[in-house]
Image (tube, helix red, strand yellow):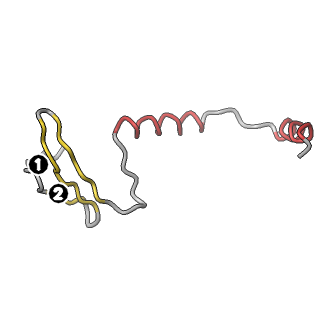
Amino acid sequence: MLVLTRKVDESIMIGDTIELKVLGVDGGSVKLGIQAPREVPVHRKEIYEEIRRENLAATQASPVDPDKLKGLLKKRGA
């Protein structure tokens, strides 16, 4: 792990396109600003972990039986 010390209004660069800037420090809390291209997803770690769990659960779901699906669609008039 790389550990850096930055003051308010100082930044670090991640690659050529991601800037992480210290916006403020209040007690034990640090306010960060992240500037990144739209195609780069940025999430708090707890949200990222939840997305990972949901994606994993989706890949482990039982496959849909095509015949059963056809029957359901016929019942709905589709």
Question: Quadrant location of the N terminus?
Answer: top left
SS of the residue under disc 2: strand
Q: Given contact means CB atoms under 8 Å apart, are the residues at marks 2 and 1 in contact?
A: yes
Q: Residue 58, percent across and down?
A: 59, 37
Q: Name the residue under label 1.
A: 4
Residue 63 image-quadrant placement: top right
Of labels 2 and 1, earlier in sequence is 1
In front of the other: 73 or 63: 73
Is 30 situated left or right of 67 in this image? left
x 92%, y 43%: residue: 77
x 34%, y 41%: residue: 44
How many labels, in total? 2
Question: Residue type at mark 1?
Answer: Leu
x 59%, y 38%: residue: 59
Is 59 situated left or right of 38 in this image? right
Q: Residue 54, percent across and down?
A: 52, 35
Q: Name the residue under label 2.
A: 12
In front of the other: 52 or 7: 7
In front of the other: 41 or 25: 25
Label 1 Cα crowd, 10 Å radius (few <14 / some 14-19 / many 20+): few
Is 70 situated left or right of 30 in this image? right
SS of the residue under disc 1: loop
- Label 2 – label 1 distance at C-alpha: 9 Å
